[in-house]
Image (cartoon, grey):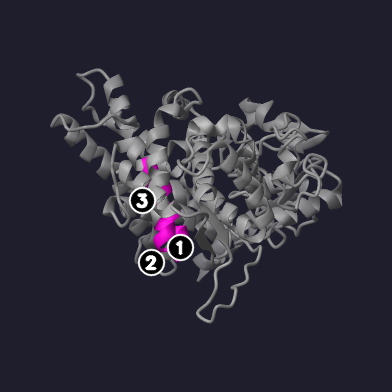
Amino acid sequence: MKTLTLLGYFLAGLAVKWAVALWNRPRRRYPPGPKGLPILGNIFNVPLENSWLVFTDWARQYGSDVIHVEALGKHICVVNSAKAAKELFHGRPHIYNDKEQSVMLLELTGWRRAWVMRPYDDYWREHRRLFHQHFRPMAVPQYHPKQTKAVRRLLPLLLDTPGDFYRHIRYMSGSSILDVVYALDVRPGDPRLKLVEKAADTSNHIVNAGVYLVDIIPILKHIPTWFPGAQFKRDAARYKKWVDAMYETPYNQFKDAMREGKAQPCFTAALLSQADADTTNTPELDEIFMSLTGTAYVAGSDTTVIALTTFLLAMVLHPEEQAFVQEELDRVVGRDRLPEMADRESLPRVTAVMQEALRWHSPLPLATPHRAMTDDEYNGYHIPAGSIVMGNSWAILHDEETYPDSYSFNPTRFLSAAGTLRDDVPFPGEVFGYGRRICPGRYFAVDTLFLAIAHILAVFTVERAVDQDGDIIEVKEDFTPQFLSLPKPFKAHFKPRFPGVEGLIRAAALEDS
């Protein structure tokens, strides 16, 4: 009993000492934000859903393009303007190139292998250098034939089972990446595709779930899986099996094929051919290559799938914009063939509708968190070292000065009176992130989006579906409120645009088989 009393006094003394230190710490002039509670800070102010909208409102309310909140001693700064994003993320990369590290995501579920999520260190820099060699603007055109093949396989799926369009889009995106990375020719339902989808879903689930307690109190990672309240450990153990399999299985299968002389040209083959023959089989090199190849799937797939789904929603809601693009396609491409990447310069309307789909509702309205590596100042405000610093892409892409009437879907904002792409309206690159932590697969993703949009509008009119009674099923502009934000489920009908379109679709899909 005496021991317990002494322990109580000791803990109480520690609490008082911590509170006094907290009270006496130097007062800094942080960026403005809502007033928080003692110790807890703004833990009850920070929204778990549609947070980008709240942060945008706070930026207006406090008259600052950078706002600040604090939760349990953790500083969070949200960047709400292109000017601030350029100055901080691009102008001060030595401060903001780091990433906030999640114990649940990186340590417990195996996503530490995803080099894009790693801290800013030599490991990250070397992986980025190797990845950029193969996915920079000058390198991506080598993948256009495989991207085109995947898009043309999408068309008969939309024709035959339009109600499953989301699943078909996901197949198209995933199959093109697996083809480019491992030379895998996968069909719908292929277990190899299911594996990478299941693994990628674990990352999305963790991110959309919000903050895990283990990320606030990292020591909890050591509690056993059977312990009460350790569901996160049991979930992580299950997720890790899928994540490890995603990285290891296709890579090892490709190495086996390479030893047997059956491997086809692809990203993995290029990496292995760069290695010296006597070091190819070292575990260290294998781990580097697995990190590069496995991460390729998550580096662009989600953005592509969500952006295409958003595009389809926009076409259902705005048939006049669809007709505007189709007039261009008929004039440039005609109706006796399908679009090619070579048509791109002659199809500015297709590019404009693609850019507007990205801008109108970003797949990541709030960019993945950066971490300030040192203390910094912005506009006289203090940003402490260790702060989470996030770009609010939603706010930037709905800035009325840059994009007037920003809540409207209006692709012509990117076009001049002569019908060419405008130089004074920026590409909505914020959807891919900021600074050197920008999505490394963005050029590949944009090319896939262009090809998919051009092909879909060339052969289909995307319109509202009808129910069994022949009544039109209404569609709303409604998106999920989580970190990865996509249109809520809706129905769409893919109507062939002209006689003979079915033959054109099936012939192209057969040709690319």
User: Type of residue at label 2?
Assistant: Phe
Tell me where residue 116 appears, x and y as whole percent: 48, 37
Does the stretch in magenta take in 55? no
Residue at 86%, 46% (x, y): give it.
63
In the image, which residues are magenta? Answer: 157-177
Toward which corner of the image does residue 29 lie, by quadrant?
top right
Q: Give the CA separation, mark 3 to mark 1.
A: 15 Å
Count of number-bearing discs = 3
Dot placed on the residue nearer the N-terminal end, 2 or 3:
2
The quadrant the C terminus occupies is top left
Q: Which residue is mark 3?
A: 506
Which one is closest to the eye, mark 2 or mark 3? 3
Q: Nearer the viewer, residue 58 or 46?
A: 58
Dot placed on the residue nearer the N-terminal end, 2 or 1:
1
* Kind of element beneath mark 1: helix
Q: Which residue is mark 2?
A: 227
Toward which corner of the image does residue 502 lie, by quadrant?
bottom left
Dot placed on the residue nearer the N-terminal end, 3 or 1:
1
Determine if residue 90 is in view. Answer: yes
Q: Which residue is mark 1?
A: 162
Q: Nearer the viewer, residue 100 or 18?
A: 100
Decide: few, some or many residues near mark 1? Use Cα within 10 Å; few <14, some 14-19, many ≥20. Answer: some
Does the stretch in magenta take in 172? yes
In the rendered image, the residue lying farthest to the bottom is: 469
Q: Give the CA separation, mark 2 to mark 3.
A: 56 Å
